[in-house]
Image: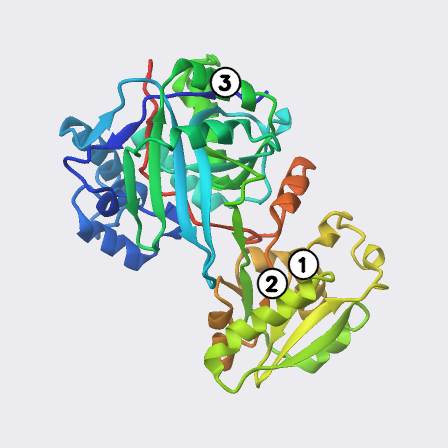
Amino acid sequence: MAQIFPFRAYRYNPAKAEPARVLTQPYDKITAEMQQRYAELSPYNLITVEKGLAHPGDSPADDVYTRAANALEQWIAENVLVKDSQPSFYAYFQAFEVPSSQERRLRQGLIALGKIEDYSAGIVFRHEQTLAGPKADRLELLRHTRAHTGQLFMLYDDPIRGVDAILEQTAKAPPETDFRDEYGVTHSLWRISDPQAIAKIQTELAAKKLVIADGHHRYETALAYRNECRAQSGSSEPNAPWERVMMTLVNARSDGLVILPTHRVVSGLPHFDAAALQSKLAPYFQTRSTKLPADSAQWGAAARAALVASGHTGCAIGAYAGGDNFLVLALKAQADLAAALPNVSPQQRELDVVLLHELVLALGLGITAEAVRQEANIRYEREASATIEMVKQGRAQVAFLLNPVGVAQVMKLAVGGEVLPQKSTDFYPKMLSGITIYRLETGA
């Protein structure tokens, strides 16, 4: 049973801080350049908390974690961050344009607290593996701030769209927060404080399974912190603040759900040979060649079009190793994947990204799963044109382009207890950190 709860969120006081100048992208999407830019926008920018700048003289008494905790306390004392008066759910809408297209979408989400569950309970499911480094960083930050500033992005399946109807009704009123971020995404927020609406939402979601779309490291950090607090207190009080975590729940049936592909760029192989790779893969893939346009600025679009067209009829992986030819590796109907990949489940064998990793990278190029985890030979790129350009400029040996994984595939695999390879999904756009903040306060 999924348990979700209203809460009194801390939010930025619009009289003291413009949302566009203080909210940030999620911590794992923030580059060094973005850190600096955010820090210069406002002294109240959440970057100090979400991913603070390290200083040369940092010590355990004064570092990114202590400064994050101090900033939160100071901003609350100065009424820069203000706690809502009533426990509420929050309707969080994002209007955006899909990258590399003119298509406009609207994603509707519900911000709430969710009960932290062990995966073994069969209520919360993951679709990705996590890494130790990011979890250690997030755990140290949580220990100091006792606050969740970023949104966990959770999917649930509801063909009846009961919660969506409540969100849409709520959104008929003017939003309390409404602004555009640096990527042109409009973020709008409404409070839902009516007890009847809250009770109906809780009932609608009670029987749902929740799949983590984005935020695996943050969820497992919240889980680890919950276990720490239980051990320290000697009990597991169900209403303790550390038993819950902030999340945004989105219906998997929503038209506003967009997953972008993440392409792979390979370098550092001692003896890369494109012809030899094709020969090794011949039992599994038919190679289709597309001549790229004379205008190299159009190469990314041409490559995407060829890949999408092939993807309509089955597994297809794009490959570029130089020159003006783009290759599509189309899975042969007679390919014996069960024999080639006996340790990979039938469901996983249906995914382009899995076949790329297991057949092309591992079997074809000898890149091990450990090398992939360490990113020893692999880089990840969102844009097809940038992926191809790296090879064209000699900064990589070969680029592999992918079509996106489908939302239904993610849900099916996750609920079935399976995980995808690293960087398999890129849900767009990201949910901003700081639009609501949950502080782990007794009686909150």
Q: Earlier in the sequence, mark 3 or mark 1?
A: 3
Residue 52 tag number:
none
Amino acid found under the numbered disc labelled 2: Leu
- Left or right position of 246 against 250: left
How far apart in space, not on screen, are marks 2 and 1 (Cα)?
7 Å
**x then y, percent, for residue 411:** 63, 40
Q: Is residue 151 above or below residue 297?
A: above
Element assignment for label 3: helix
Q: Which residue is mark 2?
A: 402
For mark 3, what is the residue? Answer: 200
Q: Amino acid at mark 1?
A: Asp
Q: Residue at x 63, y 68 (%)?
A: 307
On the question of residue 78 being in view, the answer is yes
Residue 352 bears which disc, if any?
1
Label 2 with label 1: CB-CB less than 8 Å: yes
Q: Alpha-carbon neighbours of circle 1 within 10 Å: few (<14), some, or many (≥20)?
A: many
